[in-house]
Image: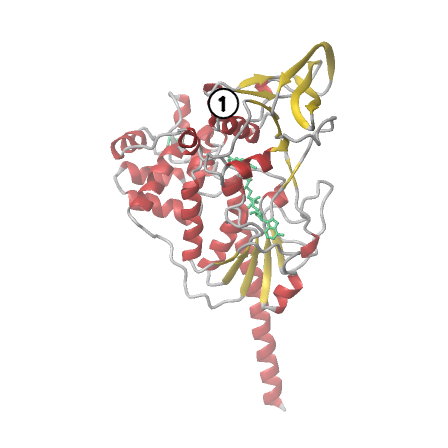
Amino acid sequence: MKGKDYLSEAKKAYSPLNAIEEAARCLLCHDAPCSKACPAGTNPEKFIRSIRFRNVKGAVETIRTANILGAACARVCPYDKLCEEACSRTGIDRPIDIGGLQRYAMDFERASGMKVLEAPAAALEKVAVIGSGPAGLAAAAGLALKGYKVTVFEAREQAGGWLTYGIVPARLPQDVVDYEVQYVKDLGVEFRMNTRVGKDVTLAALEAEGFEAFCVTVGLQGSATLDIPGLALSGVTTAAAFLAEAKPSCGALQVPSDVVVVGGGDVAMDCATTAKELGAKKVTIVYRRTVEEMPANKAELEYANKLGVSILPSFKPVEVIGENGAVKAFKAVGLDWLDRNTSVEVPESSIQLKAGLVIQAIGQTAEDVSFAGLGANSKGLAAADAETGKTSIGNVFAAGDIVNGGKTVVEAVARGKASAEAIDAYLSSVRESKATDKEVAAQKEGVR
Ligand SMILES: Cc1cc2nc3c(=O)[nH]c(=O)nc-3n(C[C@H](O)[C@H](O)[C@H](O)COP(=O)(O)OP(=O)(O)OC[C@H]3O[C@@H](n4cnc5c(N)ncnc54)[C@H](O)[C@@H]3O)c2cc1C
Ligand code: SF4
């Protein structure tokens, strides 16, 4: 039963009747602010109109053409900060449930076995995509749809990046990720798993194998850690390590009864709710600032509250206390915020929480991209154009978290798509100049 709770999706799906009813609330705005607010250009106004007029196939076409991860994004997008925030209906009562309707169309596609995208025969150059997260999958799909021979190289055993190893099943069941990865495979994209580029194979070796362009989408796999005593104790972990163990365990991971999570973002919420769903009795989130300042999505915060997670705002971690090499308690001290940037400790508010597990959810750190010959900026991120992914090396492009420092799935999809366009433009120009060189050589040959 414990495992079932952890694996089941939290939000309920629409029935056909309810989906049409919700779509009928849409004002069909002429200027469609919702569509302008989607980074991937998914065009909610158009697909909601299709659902409203019972043309679900049309809705599927609109979503899939714009977003190869339409089903994943339907579940994990921060709609309240993107299209739903922009929705004109908000001024009347509440925004259209754009995420729910997108999920309805995507579930319909899968249930009916519909495939709206087909790639041409792969006759163009070989392109290597390094990393199989949202940015890599979007870049690979975009290139395959243009006729390139695409191979994705992935260090881990399973594809999907944080979709597979991070985002919890309550929001994103693994079968949804697997379905979309298969969609990309069906476009003719090859996957080489358990292959870390830079370690198991070099870029030079891939060039020798005939790859003519590279898209680096390696994301942020490292974890930021606290600077307090006791971090070496067993039972102190990071969000990335905890979630990467919890999700593949399908609910079987054992957690102690008292868990402390440090952080205030979506990842901290995911850790806290996961620990609860796996059976922890008391889960406490310790956050430096106020609840209002938590960067976590409102819905995630509400879900954590619903599960009984306690939140300790304005507290600063001080020490992890151990016994026989394992975590026993977590010490924090209250902060009095004078203004947004300065705070003073309030020593008399020091608190000690019983803990068998301490999870640090305070951010991810960038992968080293020197294997691709790329420079990094002061934050360790790949030096690349934020829009197109172009780098100082002509045939190397970069996209997703490794360039933007960690945003959202839909943003990674958008940047992966844009990189596919930039790679196509680059390879097309190389092809054209080779053709011109050949023509000139042939003309010279004729003159002689
Ligand atoms: C726990 C968690 C929860 C999140 N929840 C949400 C959410 O609810 N909504 C949302 O929109 N966003 C969420 N995000 C953010 C979102 O998941 C990321 O922005 C997105 O996954 C970035 O995609 P990416 O392709 O750039 O990188 P990643 O998803 O990190 O994928 C990179 C891939 O590259 C592989 N790789 C790394 N180095 C190499 C190498 N040298 N060779 C081969 N492969 C390599 C990695 O193994 C990984 O599979 C969450 C992130 C985390 C960590
Ligand atoms: S902004 Fe809202 S009401 Fe207007 S078209 Fe988009 S979803 Fe419909």
User: For the point 63% across and 40% down, which residue is it?
Assistant: 405
Q: In this view, does 169 lie above or below 368?
A: above
On screen, residue 410 above or below 429: above
Q: What element carries label 1?
A: helix
Residue type, numbered disc 1 = Ala
**Residue at the extreme bottom:** 448
Asked if one can make out residue 66 in the rendered structure from this viewpoint, the answer is no
- Residue 43 is drawn in which quadrant? top left
Closer-to-camera residue (440/236): 236
Question: Where on the image, by quarter, is ligand 2?
Answer: top left
Q: Which colour scheme is used?
A: secondary structure
Q: Is residue 328 left or right of residue 5?
A: right
Rate crowding at label 1 as few (under 14), some (14 to 19) or many (20 or more) other CA atoms within 10 Å: many
Disc 1 residue: CB within 8 Å of ligand 1:
no
Task: Specify whether 243 is left or right of 173.
Answer: right
- Viewport quadrant of the N terminus: top left
**In this view, which residue lies farthest toward the front?**
324
Front in this rendered view, residue 378 or 33: 378
Residue 24 x, y percent position in the rendering? 29, 31
One can see residue 257 in this view: yes
Q: Where is residue 125 in the image (x, y as percent from the top left)?
A: 53, 66
Which residue is at 68% across, 18% downward?
331
Quadrant containing the C terminus is: bottom right
Q: Which of 7 and 210 is in front in this view?
A: 7
Q: Name the residue under label 1.
A: 304
